[in-house]
Image (spheres, rainbow, N blue to C red):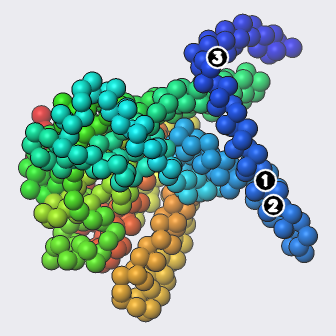
C-alpha cells in the first residue's frame, strides 16, 4: 500500500540515524547492555517470587502482576536498579502525566534517587583531575564521608583553605556522562524504531519527548549550568529586596568546573520539620509566606524558577531566612503559559470553574473547539469530591491529636491525594483534546509541595487567597528590568 511505500522511503534515513547513534554510543553501550540484562534478571526474579506466592491463592493473580515486568511496580524497580538515567527518566514520567498513563505516573512518584556512594579515593582523583592543583592548596580539609549520594552526584562537606569558610562540594560520579549518553541513545533508538513501525506514535511526538528528556538530563550533569541558575536566583533575590528573607548558596568559581561544584554550606532544617522550625522562629506561618512570595516572584522576575522544591531543597536557615538549595532542575515559563496559569490559580482559589476551564483551554490548546461549559462541570466534579475527602480527613486528624506526628501522617496521605487530583485534572482535560506543556506539570508539582507545607505550617491559611502572598504579576510592584 501507499502508506508502506512512504515508510519504505524513510527507511534509509532511519538506518543512517541508527548507525550514527550507535557509533556515538561507543563501547560503553555494550557494558550498559550487560548491566541491563543483570537488572532485568534481578527484577524478573522478584516478579517470579511474588507471582508464585499469589498464583496459589484464591484471589488469583493481581492486575499489577499480569503485565509482568512492564507493570508499573516492576518497571519502577527495574528503573531504580538501572540507576542514573532511568531514575531520572522515572522522575520525568512522574512529572509528565500528559505523556504517560496515570497508573505509571502514580507509581513513579515513588521513584527515589538514592545510590550507594562512590569510594572517596575515586572522588579525590576526580577533584585532582578537574581542579588541576593540589587539593590541600584549595581545601583545608574534605570530609571523606559523603553528606548525600544520588545516582548522578555525591556531596561532601569541606572547608576552604583561604577564607576558612564551610562549603559543600558536589562531584559528578565517575563514568556518568558516558552512561547517560549510552542510555539516552538506546532510548532514542527504541523511540525511532517504534515511531517507524507505528506511525500513530508520531502524533504523540515520542522522539520529541525523548529529545526533551535528553536535553534536560545533559543540563543536569553540567554543573556550570547549575551554578548559573543559582547565581541568577540570588541576583533576583537581591534585586527584589528579599535578601533579608531568603538565600541561595554562594558559588566558589575558583574551585568549580563542569563536574565539580563548590558552594557555600547552608545550615538549617527542612520546611517539614515543624518542631525545629518552632524553635528557630516565633511564627512558622511567616516563614511559609516568605517562601511562597520568593518562589512565586521568581516565576515572573527571574529567568528560571526552582522546579524541585521538595523538603530536601527548601530549608529554614539558622538565621531565620529561607534557603533554596540544589538548582539542578529549573523551569522556564513562557509569558503565554504564565498568563493562563494566573487565571487558573485565581479560579482555583475562588472555585470559578468556568474561568478555570477557559484558562486550561488556553494553556493546552491544540486547535480543537472545546465545550467550555461541560468542561467546567467536569472540573467541578473533581474538585468537590476532593474537598469532601480532605475536609473529613482534616477533622479526623484534628480529633486524633494536635501533635506534629499526626499532622505529618496526615500530610503524607494528603500528598497522594493532591497527586491524584492533578492526574484527574490532566485526564479530564485530555478527554477534551488538550495537551499541556511540560512547564505546566513542573509548576503544578511545585504547587503540590507548597500545598503540603501549608497544611503542615499554616493549616488555616489559604495559599492562593491570602493577602500576604503575591501570586499575580499585577501585585508584583517591584519588577526587575
From the image, state whether disc 3 or disc 2 is nearer to you: 2
The residue to which callout 2 is attached is: 49
Q: Nearer the viewer, residue 341 or 457?
A: 457
| Residue pictured at 32% horizontal, 29% vertical | 128
* Separation of marks 3 and 2 at Cα, in angstroms: 36 Å
Q: Residues within 10 Å of mark 2 (few under 14, many from 20)?
A: few
Is 310 on the left or on the right of 365, as rendered?
left
**Helix, strand or loop status at disc 2:** helix
Q: Residues within 10 Å of mark 3 (few under 14, many from 20)?
A: some
Kindly check if marks 3 and 1 are in contact, taking CB atoms under 8 A apart as contact: no
Q: Position of residue 313 (x, y in %)?
A: 33, 54
Kindly indicate the quadrant of the structure image that contains residue 120.
Answer: top left
The residue to which callout 3 is attached is: 22
**Helix, strand or loop status at disc 1:** helix
Is 241 on the left or on the right of 431, as rendered?
left
| Residue pictured at 54% horizontal, 37% vertical | 85
Quarter of the image with the N terminus is top right
Q: Nearer the viewer, residue 442 or 154?
A: 154
Q: Which mark is residue 401?
A: none
Q: Which mark is residue 45?
A: 1
Is 263 on the left or on the right of 121, as rendered?
left
* Separation of marks 2 and 1 at Cα, in angstroms: 6 Å
Kindly indicate the quadrant of the structure image that contains residue 299.
Answer: top left
Kindly check if marks 2 and 1 are in contact, taking CB atoms under 8 A apart as contact: yes
| Residue pictured at 18% horizontal, 30% vertical | 254
Q: Is residue 425 above or below residue 198?
A: below
Amino acid at each position: 500500500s501507499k502508506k508502506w511505500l512512504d515508510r519504505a522511503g524513510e527507511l534509509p534515513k532511519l538506518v543512517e540515524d541508527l548507525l550514527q547513534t550507535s557509533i556515538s554510543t561507543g563501547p560503553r553501550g555494550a557494558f550498559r547492555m550487560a548491566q541491563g540484562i543483570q537488572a532485568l534478571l534481578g527484577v524478573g526474579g522478584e516478579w517470579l517470587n511474588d507471582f508464585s506466592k499469589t498464583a496459589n491463592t484464591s484471589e488469583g493473580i493481581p492486575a499489577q502482576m499480569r503485565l509482568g515486568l512492564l507493570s508499573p511496580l516492576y518497571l519502577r524497580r527495574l528503573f531504580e536498579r538501572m540507576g542514573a538515567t532511568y531514575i531520572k527518566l522515572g522522575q520525568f514520567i512522574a512529572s509528565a502525566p500528559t505523556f504517560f498513563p496515570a497508573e505509571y505516573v502514580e507509581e513513579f512518584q515513588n521513584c527515589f534517587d538514592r545510590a550507594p556512594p562512590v569510594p572517596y579515593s575515586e572522588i579525590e582523583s576526580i577533584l585532582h583531575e578537574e581542579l588541576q592543583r593540589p587539593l590541600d592548596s584549595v581545601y583545608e580539609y574534605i570530609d571523606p564521608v559523603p553528606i548525600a549520594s544520588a545516582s548522578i552526584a555525591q556531596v561532601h562537606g569541606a572547608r576552604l583553605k583561604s577564607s576558612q569558610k564551610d562549603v559543600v562540594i558536589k562531584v559528578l560520579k565517575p563514568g556518568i556522562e558516558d552512561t547517560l549518553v549510552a542510555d539516552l541513545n538506546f532510548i532514542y533508538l527504541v523511540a525511532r524504531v517504534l515511531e517507524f513501525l507505528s506511525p500513530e506514535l508520531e502524533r504523540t511526538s515520542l522522539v520529541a519527548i525523548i529529545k526533551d528528556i535528553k536535553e534536560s538530563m545533559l543540563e543536569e550533569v553540567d554543573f556550570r549550568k547549575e551554578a548559573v541558575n543559582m547565581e541568577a536566583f540570588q541576583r533576583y533575590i537581591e534585586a527584589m529586596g528579599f535578601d533579608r528573607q531568603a538565600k541561595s548558596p554562594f558559588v566558589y568559581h575558583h574551585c568549580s568546573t563542569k563536574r565539580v561544584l563548590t558552594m557555600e554550606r547552608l545550615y538549617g532544617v527542612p520546611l517539614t520539620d515543624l518542631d525545629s522550625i518552632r524553635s528557630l522562629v516565633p511564627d512558622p506561618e511567616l516563614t511559609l509566606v516568605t517562601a511562597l512570595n520568593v518562589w512565586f516572584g521568581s516565576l515572573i522576575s527571574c529567568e528560571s524558577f526552582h522546579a524541585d522544591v521538595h523538603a530536601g531543597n527548601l530549608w529554614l536557615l539558622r538565621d531565620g531566612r529561607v534557603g533554596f538549595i540544589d538548582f539542578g532542575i529549573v523551569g522556564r515559563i513562557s509569558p503565554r503559559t504564565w498568563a493562563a496559569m494566573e487565571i487558573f490559580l485565581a479560579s482555583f482559589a475562588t472555585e470559578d470553574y468556568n474561568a478555570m476551564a477557559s484558562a486550561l483551554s488556553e494553556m493546552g490548546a491544540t486547535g480543537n473547539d472545546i465545550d467550555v461549559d461541560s468542561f467546567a462541570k467536569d472540573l467541578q466534579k473533581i474538585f468537590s469530591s476532593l474537598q469532601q475527602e480532605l475536609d473529613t480527613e482534616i477533622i479526623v486528624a484534628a480529633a486524633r491529636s494536635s501533635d506534629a506526628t499526626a499532622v505529618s501522617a496526615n500530610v503524607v496521605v494528603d500528598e497522594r491525594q493532591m497527586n491524584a487530583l492533578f492526574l484527574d485534572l490532566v485526564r479530564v482535560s485530555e478527554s477534551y483534546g488538550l495537551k499541556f506543556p511540560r512547564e505546566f506539570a513542573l509548576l503544578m508539582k511545585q504547587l503540590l509541595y507548597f500545598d503540603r507545607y501549608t497544611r503542615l505550617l499554616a493549616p488555616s491559611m489559604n495559599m492562593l487567597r491570602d493577602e500576604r502572598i503575591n501570586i499575580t504579576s499585577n501585585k508584583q510592584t517591584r519588577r526587575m528590568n
